Image: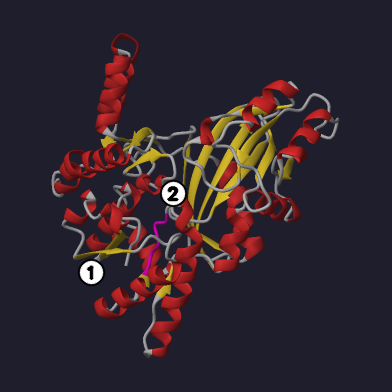
Amino acid sequence: MVTGGKMTKALHVCRHLAAAGWRVVLVETHKYWHVGSRFSSSVASFHTVPVPEDHPEAYVQALLGIAAAEGVTMFIPVSSPIASLYDALAGEALAAQAQAQGRQCRSWSLPAATTALLDHKGSFSAHAAALELLVPQHHVVTSPQQLQQLNSEKALGAGRRFVLKSIAYDSVHRADLMLLPCSAAKLAAYLARPDISITQQCPWILQEYIQGREYSCYSLAHLGRLVAHADTAAALSNLNYKYEGHPAIHQWVEAFVQRTNASGQLCFDFIESAKDGRLYCIECNPRTSSVITEFHDSSQLAAAFASPADVHQTINPLPHSCPIYWWWNEVARLAASPWWYAPTFLSVIGAGVDGVFTPADPWPFIALHYLQVPALLVGNMLRGNPWKKVDLCIGKVAELYGD
């Protein structure tokens, strides 16, 4: 059973497993009944369930019912940021249900307590630092007054700048790049915005701003061993993936997995400092990353999920694997800057492959662009809900109050 059916990464997981002979059940929330991936030849059965953050108990019960009806023996949550903890709780419930019924159900979620710790940018940074792994300096902020005080004092350190981020995933404000220290007037104007809320229940984080090259990675861990791993150069909104094979990233993640005896899926974001070349881990997302699409032409990933104990050497994407792009995203870039982007467009299309389309399984590509995205846009217009962009990689519209 695979969750997160709206996202390209879930489709890739389905295709890997189906190619290895698994019967795949795909799940999404009711809002996304129209996802393109439900039409994939790799998907044997598709179900919709309640929204986990609104109805957590009903969500877990729905997954338990699907698992019992479909005879699920492996659970691979491809979680949205909000759903990570709920999928971790569901994974524990699924394993318990299977044991009570005299069968097994492997969950590829981290334990719920670990998921909560790693998903919080502040507690993750403190945890990684305690493991003697390099992370930026940080301050957790729980009120506007605390933030204003930090901004006015020397607590941030001479010559250092810090970026302000919401600890909870925020698809709208994650691109604000509000830097401190700044003038009191500028900070007051930012905090006065009606859509900015910093409270004990909704904390934010000040994280040291480091200039350099950004990276993301996806890792599959089993009992403290790194079973599969891929990385890519990254940006705030990443719609191009190419395997880098950065050795320092591999070493950092391998050390983290070993020192925590981790089992599950992990995604880390890094910055390699332009000043001194040191690699800093910015955050951990305890869930599947779209970096998994780099395994698109590998035949080994399904075995890593199914029999991790039999994997004796970390599985990486193929060395000369084609980069991933999303066709209509590239067309939109070309339309916005036809003369400037044309050479890049030809290079990207010539060297890469679309993240969704394959000749053997074309329907997800067609349905994504002509059913899934149009239905989401129409829904937003009918509700009058502001939205910022369409993200074809994760198959959703970045909207206010969205997931």
Choose top left, top right, bottom left or bottom right for residue 348. top left
Q: Nearer the viewer, residue 132 or 136?
A: 136
Outermost residue toward the right in this view: 154
Position above or below: 71 against 261: below
Name the residue tied to disc 1.
23
Q: Earlier in the sequence, mark 2 or mark 1?
A: 1
Res. 343 image quadrant: top left
Q: Position of residue 33 (x, y in %)?
A: 24, 55
Mark 2 neighbour class, 10 Å CA radius: few under 14, some 14 to 19, many 20 or more: many
Name the residue: 58% across, 31% down: 193
Few, some or many residues within 10 Å of mark 1 (<14, 14–19, 20+): some
Residue at 29%, 53% in the rendered image = 31
Question: The residue under label 2 is which amino acid type?
Answer: Ser
Question: What's under tag 1, amino acid-wise?
Answer: Arg
Q: Which residue is the site of mark 2?
A: 289
What residue is at 35 percent from the left and 61 percent from the top?
A: 3
Residue 35, x across and y down, in percent: 24, 51
- Residues in magenta, as a range: 75-79
* Left or right: residue 83 compared with residue 167: left
